[in-house]
Image: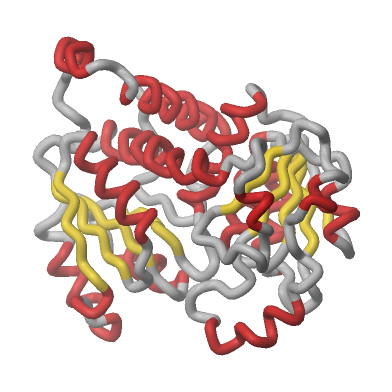
């Protein structure tokens, strides 16, 4: 039985290398199991790890993909997903809100702004807290990305991934998790939009344990040379809309297009966490390219998060 020692999942650093590797195996098992016929599923059915449990999904930032993947995943593990929008909670009275919540539900998935909100929740928690996204980290997306790379290349050790664009929460989570499992990460971000130094320092220490490297490049072209995956995200993340006009100018040269892909390994896959702005950070041609795995990543959110919840709750049934 797959078990995770930590009750919470905020940055991904809570999991050991062995737990991460096993999580990816369990996620692949869930994917394959889902493809079984109804008869096969009924024959092998057993009570889900979330049977009789309610998980609150709190959205201070909206997201279709997070709502779908967690909602479906919780249901398939036998639990009940209760969705709360940001306007149904009062952030200034977090202690009161979460104090009430923890007595009625068996866990919380929160998609929020400041990462400190999650840290405060954990300080109050007697139930598991999972980070669905914060301004600093997006670890559930990174789990799906690792699963996608494993499915396409078989092994993660020795792969090279280039991230092009904003040094945001998606890059932070890739830096913390991918090198930890042996993937070299190259990144090219405009000055003023580089990853957080403190998070980068933690990631570099973890990369040593994974026998991988993290390298900064001054240009997208230098970063993608010979890599197995090219990754990008929107130039303007949620919460930064007022900066959009400036960001469009700053990031104009940070686009995944035919020319950039030609510099990568011939087997290189094209990655994006979605949603996207076609024609900005990625061209329409690259979205439809045979080596684009954007929607595979999206589906893998479901399988990876099911494996995560399975690991957290197997120890707490």
In the image shown, does 194 or 237 lie closer to the viewer?
Answer: 237
- Relative image position of residue 116 (x, y in whole percent): 44, 72
* Residue 152 horizontal side relative to residue 106, left or right: right
* Residue 226 horizontal side relative to residue 18, left or right: right
Residue at position x 44%, y 56% in the image:
10
Residue at position x 14%, y 49% in the image:
54
User: Which corner quadrant holds the C terminus?
Assistant: top left
User: Which corner quadrant holds the N terminus?
Assistant: top left
- Relative image position of residue 151 (x, y in whole percent): 57, 27
- Relative image position of residue 192 (x, y in whole percent): 75, 79
Q: Is residue 93 above or below residue 146?
A: below
Quadrant of res 316? top left
Task: Please indicate, yes or no, whether residue 164 appears anywhere in the rendered image.
Answer: yes
* Residue 51 horizontal side relative to residue 315, left or right: left
Residue at position x 37%, y 41% in the image:
302
Q: Is residue 268 above or below residue 253?
A: above
In the image shown, does 153 or 100 lie closer to the viewer?
Answer: 153
Q: Is residue 295 above or below residue 47?
A: below
Residue at position x 57%, y 38% in the image:
146
- Relative image position of residue 296 (x, y in whole percent): 51, 39
Quadrant of res 250? bottom right
In the image shown, does 179 or 229 lie closer to the viewer?
Answer: 229
Q: How is the image coloured?
A: secondary structure
């Amino acid at each position: 039985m797959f078990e995770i020692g930590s009750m919470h999942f905020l940055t991904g650093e809570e999991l050991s290398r062995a737990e991460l590797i096993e999580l990816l195996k369990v996620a692949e098992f869930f994917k394959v199991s889902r493809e079984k016929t109804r008869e096969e599923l009924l024959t092998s059915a057993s009570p889900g790890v979330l049977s009789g449990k309610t998980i609150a999904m709190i959205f201070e930032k909206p997201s279709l993909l997070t709502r779908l993947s967690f909602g479906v995943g919780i249901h398939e593990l036998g639990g009940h997903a209760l969705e709360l929008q940001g306007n149904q909670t009062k952030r200034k009275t977090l202690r009161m809100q979460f104090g009430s919540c923890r007595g009625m539900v068996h866990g919380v998935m929160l998609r929020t702004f400041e990462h400190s909100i999650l840290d405060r929740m954990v300080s109050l928690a007697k139930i598991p807290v999972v980070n669905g996204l914060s301004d600093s980290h997006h670890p559930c997306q990174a789990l799906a990305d690792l699963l996608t790379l494993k499915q396409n290349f078989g092994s993660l050790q020795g792969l090279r991934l280039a991230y092009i664009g904003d040094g945001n929460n998606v890059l932070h989570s890739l830096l913390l998790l991918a090198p930890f499992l042996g993937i070299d990460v190259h990144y090219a971000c405009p000055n003023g939009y580089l990853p957080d130094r403190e998070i980068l320092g933690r990631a570099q220490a973890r990369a040593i344990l994974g026998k991988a490297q993290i390298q900064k490049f001054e240009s997208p072209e230098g970063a993608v040379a010979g890599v197995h995956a090219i990754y990008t995200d929107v130039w303007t993340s949620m919460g930064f809309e007022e900066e959009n006009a400036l960001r469009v100018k700053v990031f104009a040269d940070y686009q995944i297009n035919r020319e950039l892909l030609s510099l990568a390994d011939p087997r290189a896959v094209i990655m994006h966490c979605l949603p996207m702005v076609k024609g900005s950070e990625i061209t329409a041609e690259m979205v439809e390219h045979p080596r684009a795995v954007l929607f595979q990543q999206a589906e893998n959110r479901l399988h990876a998060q099911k494996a995560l919840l399975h690991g957290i709750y197997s120890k707490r049934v």
